[in-house]
Image: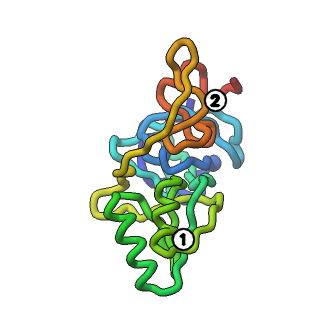
Amino acid sequence: MLIFDRMGGDPAQCVGEVALALEWRQKSRMRLAIETGPRAGEAIGFDLPRGTVLRDGTLVASATGQSLRVRAADEELIHVEAETPFALMRIAYHLGNRHVPLQMGEGWVRLQYDHVLENMVRGLGGAVTLIDAGFDPESGAYGYGHHGHAHHTHHESDSSGSVLGVGLHGHDDRRHAPRIHDFLTDPVQPR
């Protein structure tokens, strides 16, 4: 299996691309399959330095000089606009105060979907559109952060105590990357 263990690489030696959600682009070790390109479908591994965060378009390389392009996969996002630059700045301030990763563009900000934050943004006068798009937030002074607010979601459990269906943000967990305990089977093979 081809292992990608360093940042960078030669675009001329690119064997393909993978699209990963932000949660996965923050992991240093994983096994997956190349999605597109000359070696699509081939099982590969990442063994990157701890703390590595892959940005949209990043190349990673193997010891043999082959490279792989990493793209930001589509995620459920909140696209926020406001009537004035000050109003948008105020919304961004309140989101930043909660350590929410934000992607910023000219006249808009985007964040990962969260119903509590959606309601807060609306309450601050933000115009909200729910979209599916690649998410490549600012890394900030300290790197990517995690939500700093509490979530109050009712979870249903099966007889073994495992949580069913509803995830941390109150919607179906299948929309998110698997957790480490989900890898009881080979993630490259269909379940």
Q: Amino acid at mark 2?
A: Val
Q: Quadrant of the C terminus?
A: top right
How crowded pointer 2 is (Cα within 10 Å; few <14, some 14-19, many 20+) is rated as some
Q: Residue at x 44, y 64 (%)?
A: 102
Disc with the residue nearer the chain's start (1 vs 2):
1
Q: Position of residue 158 (x, y in %)?
A: 57, 18
Q: Quadrant of residue 129?
A: bottom right
Mark whose residue sits in front, 1 or 2: 1
Name above or below for residue 145 compared with residue 86.
above
Is residue 133 visible from the viewing direction of this image?
yes
How crowded pointer 1 is (Cα within 10 Å; few <14, some 14-19, many 20+) is rated as many
Structural distance between the alpha carbons of marks 1 and 2: 35 Å
Q: Amino acid at mark 1?
A: Val
Name above or below for residue 73 compared with residue 157.
below
Colouring style: rainbow
Q: Position of residue 48 (x, y in %)?
A: 40, 41
Q: Quadrant of residue 74?
A: bottom right
Q: Is residue 191 left or right of residue 110?
A: right
What mark, if any, has residue 124 been given in the picture? Answer: none
Viewer-nearest residue: 41 or 73 = 73
What mark, if any, has residue 188 been given in the picture? Answer: 2
Q: Is residue 163 left or right of residue 43?
A: left
Viewer-nearest residue: 71 or 93 = 93
What mark, if any, has residue 80 been given in the picture? Answer: 1
Secondary structure at badge 1 equals: strand
Q: Residue at x 52, y 20 (%)?
A: 162
Name above or below for residue 83 compared with residue 33.
below
Q: Residue at x 31, y 63 (%)?
A: 97
Q: How many discs mark residues in the rendered view? A: 2
Q: Position of residue 55 (x, y in %)?
A: 48, 57
Secondary structure at badge 2 equals: loop
